[in-house]
């Protein structure tokens, strides 16, 4: 109760602040995945060989004959970025909580906001497990997939700040909703399959890390096939909406999904053809975050939760926060 009183003393977040915090959450949650890929392709995954300390007895990189200074700082920098992600996540919670004090109906907004710091804690634990197990490929995969979930949730949070709290009414037919669910499932399959390709590929985060013992050609074929499924479902969805007459907002977001997905597919093909160069790996990880954000935005645009009521504080006489 006392904590709520402290939050009530904070300035009410404006529309611009709400939007900025949610976008920052998307950028930081996606960015940590990109910097993680930089750690992997530079072989810096064990630059800090212990966790949560960098070296036994030190939170920071130290001169060591077995570990290059650059790889230490690349890994340590990725750990430091987790702090930035945590700060943004905490600010999202404070903003959502402050809004709910004036608008008690905004429970879903607060729940979504809490997934951000919850995800940071989960990622810290998974990251520790990844280091302590010597970067086993499946732990790295879990680490990346957790980031993808958080990028999705951060995108939902951005939309939650900009929509009401009514029960969602779908702007598409039931068959369109089913296709959207299938699209999201196909995207999840593409992401999971991508981690197996990475697990068998040349960039394990450390030269001595054991790799997934499976034919990379087969894994790449499965990964590419699932992307084809994603694109086929997207095409069928468009045909269905063309017949039913979908709103303009849906078409705009639908077009963006196509552009991003095709660009990501082309990048993946070039990356494979060139022998998986380091720089393209990180761009591909960035592209995967873009696919998640655009797909989540399409999902959100397909349903209506009514007008937003919390861009402004409640009147002083009606506001629980104002009475404190």
Image: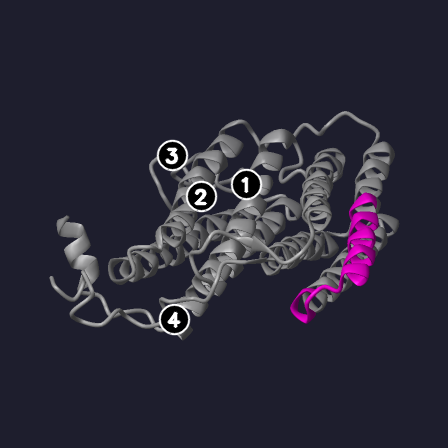
Give the crowd class for mark 2: few <14, some 14-19, many >=20 residues within 10 Å.
Answer: many
Asked whether disc 2 touches disc 1, contact meaning CB atoms under 8 Å apart, the reply is yes
Location of the C terminus by quadrant is bottom left
Q: State how far apart marks 2 and 1 are (Cα).
A: 8 Å
Secondary structure mainly formed by the magenta segment: helix
Q: Earlier in the sequence, mark 2 or mark 1?
A: 2
Q: State how far apart marks 4 and 2 are (Cα).
A: 22 Å
Q: State how far apart marks 1 and 4 are (Cα).
A: 26 Å
Q: Secondary structure at mark 1?
A: helix
Mark 1, residue position: 146
- Tell me residue 83's x, y (percent): 39, 52
Q: State how far apart marks 1 and 3 are (Cα).
A: 27 Å
Give the crowd class for mark 4: few <14, some 14-19, many >=20 residues within 10 Å.
Answer: some
In the displayed structure, 154 sits above or below 215; it is below
Q: Earlier in the sequence, mark 4 or mark 2?
A: 4
Q: Nearer the viewer, mark 1 or mark 3?
A: 1
Q: State how far apart marks 2 and 3 are (Cα).
A: 26 Å
In the displayed structure, 307 sits above or below 216; it is below
Q: Nearer the viewer, mark 4 or mark 3?
A: 4
- Tell me residue 231's x, y (percent): 81, 51
Q: Secondary structure at mark 2?
A: helix
- The numbered mark at residue 17 is 4
Magenta stretch: residue 230 in it? Answer: yes
233 relative position to 74: left or right? right
41 relative position to 150: left or right? right
Q: Nearer the viewer, residue 271 or 243?
A: 243
Mark 2, residue position: 119
């Amino acid at each position: 109760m006392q904590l709520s009183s402290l939050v009530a003393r904070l300035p009410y977040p404006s529309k611009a602040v709400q939007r900025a915090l949610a976008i920052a959450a998307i950028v930081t949650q996606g960015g940590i995945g990109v910097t993680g890929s930089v750690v992997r392709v530079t072989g810096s995954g064990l630059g800090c060989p212990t966790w949560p300390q960098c070296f036994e007895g030190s939170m920071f990189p130290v001169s060591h004959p077995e570990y290059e200074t650059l790889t230490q700082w690349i890994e340590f920098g990725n750990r430091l970025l987790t702090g930035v992600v945590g700060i943004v996540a905490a600010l999202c919670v404070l903003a959502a909580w402050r809004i709910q004090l004036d608008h008690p109906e905004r429970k879903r907004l607060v729940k979504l906001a809490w997934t951000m710091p919850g995800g940071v804690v989960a990622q810290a634990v998974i990251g520790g497990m990844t280091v302590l197990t010597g970067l086993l490929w499946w732990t790295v995969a879990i680490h990346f997939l957790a980031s993808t979930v958080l990028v999705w949730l951060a995108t939902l949070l951005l939309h939650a700040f900009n929509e009401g709290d009514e029960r969602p009414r779908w702007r598409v037919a039931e068959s369109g909703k089913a296709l959207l669910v299938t699209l999201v499932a196909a995207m999840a399959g593409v992401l999971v399959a991508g981690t197996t390709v990475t697990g068998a590929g040349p960039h394990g985060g450390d030269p001595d890390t054991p790799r997934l013992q499976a034919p990379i050609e087969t894994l790449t074929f499965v990964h590419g096939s699932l992307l084809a499924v994603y694109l086929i479902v997207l095409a069928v969805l468009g045909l269905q909406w063309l017949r039913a007459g979908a709103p303009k907002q849906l078409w705009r977001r639908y077009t963006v999904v196509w552009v991003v997905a095709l660009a990501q597919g082309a990048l993946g093909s070039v990356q494979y053809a060139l022998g998986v160069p380091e720089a393209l790996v990180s761009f591909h990880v960035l592209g995967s975050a873009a696919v998640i954000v655009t797909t989540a935005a399409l999902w959100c645009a397909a349903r209506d939760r009514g007008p937003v009521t919390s861009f402004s504080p409640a009147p002083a006489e009606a506001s629980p926060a104002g009475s404190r």
